Amino acid sequence: MAVSLDLDSLTTEGIAFFEKMLNLLKNPAFWPQFITILVVFGIARWLLAPLINRMLDSMMQYTQRVLSFRHLWDALRNNSVPISWLVLQWIAIKVTAYAGLYNGALITVASLLTAWVLIRLATMLVKNKSISKLIAFSAWTVAALNIFGYLDDTMTLLDSLSVNIGQIRLSPLTVLKIGLSLWFALWLANALSSLLERRLERSTTTNASTRVLVSKLTRITLVLFAILIALSSVGIDLTALAVFSGALGVGLGFGLQKIFSNLVSGVILLMDKSIKPGDVISLGLSFGWINHLGLRYTSVITRDGIETLIPNEEMITQRVENWSYSNRLIRLRVPVGISYDSDVRLAIKLCVEAAQMVPRIKLDPEPKAQLMAFGDNSVNLEVRVWIDDPEAGRGSVISELLLNVWDSFHENDINIPYPQRDLHVKSVLGETQLSALGIKPELNT
């Protein structure tokens, strides 16, 4: 690894810059322009900008329902000061040019303001504030260096601070180019994949699993192409990274074995469509409906509102109960016990009628009640009903059914027995102890 640094060029450029600044300050024509810039800024900041804001507020009241106009008014209001300053600055340039006065500093400030306003308006399209500020700072710095004529010298200086790693030459300029290229390529890839996802969500001809599979694979493909294109666009030979990437791939394969296993399992789940968003599943202690199906994990929301993230490998290797895989109809079995002195046929009829009064219970297939066994304490019946909305849970259906059964049994004198037990007491006391307790022992003859 070799490091190259041109100190002579760095010193020369620094001295030249300071000499230029000193000559500018010594120029008698600079100070009238400086005072003009301050006066123009004060007029724009405290007079013209408030007037523009009041006009925009009044115009916004008439265009509140039009979303595009509201965004336009917000953008103009947030940049009213630099826009006002820029307009007055160009007016001052025209006036000084008409009077035959030197206005080089005024033109420089106007150029900087123009770049500032355009960059501010462009970065308002970026939702992330941190990224927006970074882009604005970088673009404004490049624009300022270009206006002052130092952009080429700065790029040459940054390129001279280089580090050679094998056949790859890295410098701050190369790192900046790679960063900008990667950011733009990844932003474009994410924008295209998001557009495709929105189109797929509105599609009625594809199911949920196919939409998720296509969107995920498209995003991964676009991101990989974006990285390769960004690296090749800055002059990095990708063949030089072949050996390094191969060794890195082997290391990652051993260290990230579980992660890759979950990724492959996620692709398999999306391709075979065994589970999909909206399905109601049961896996171990987790029961709920699938909210999100990703490449690494599956998000399951339980009836308690708890979102459980289950690795996709478990969805492949373990037994999963999918309540809505091929048919959303689910049968529920509800046990009911009646006393032996009750009318069993009437109880069966009342159970069926009670099930038919529950809105969530399907009438086709129709509810049924059957005699299952003669128990120790009761005659055991079982009510069998069907529902087609398992994501809404089964507890509320069973509760409403049992309440209807309870009311019907009470109205028709069908008893629900208590558990009965026979208690046998064997005495271990003798006759003397029984006599002392006032108990007369029974004599067997």
Image (spheres, grey):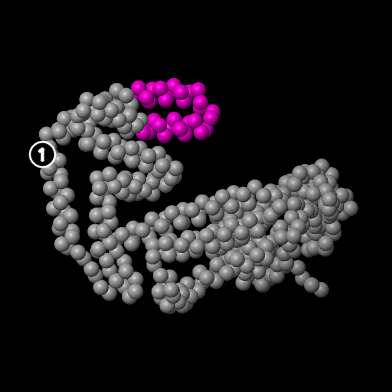
What is the span of residues highlighted in magenta in the rendered image?
50-79
Identify which residue is drawn at 37% across, 33% down: 78
71 falls in the magenta region? yes
Count how many numbered circles sit on residues in the image. Answer: 1
Tell me what residue is drawn at x 44 percent, y 30 percent: 73
**Element type at marker 1?**
helix
Q: What amino acid type should be assigned to the residue bearing mark 1? A: Lys
Q: Nearer the viewer, residue 333 or 204?
A: 204
Point out residue 433 in the picture as x, y percentages from the top left corner.
64, 69
Residue 217, image x, y percentages: 57, 62
Residue 14 visible, this orientation: yes
Quadrant assignment, res 267:
bottom right
In the foreground, 280 or 19: 19
User: Could you tell me what secondary structure mostly forms the magenta stretch?
Assistant: helix
- Identify the image quadrant of the N terminus: bottom left
Q: Is 318 part of what is drawn in magenta?
A: no
| Relative to 135, residue 163 above or below | below
- Residue where numbered disc 1 is placed: 26
In the image, 22 versus 376, the foreground residue is 22
Q: Residues within 10 Å of mark 1 (few under 14, many from 20)?
A: few
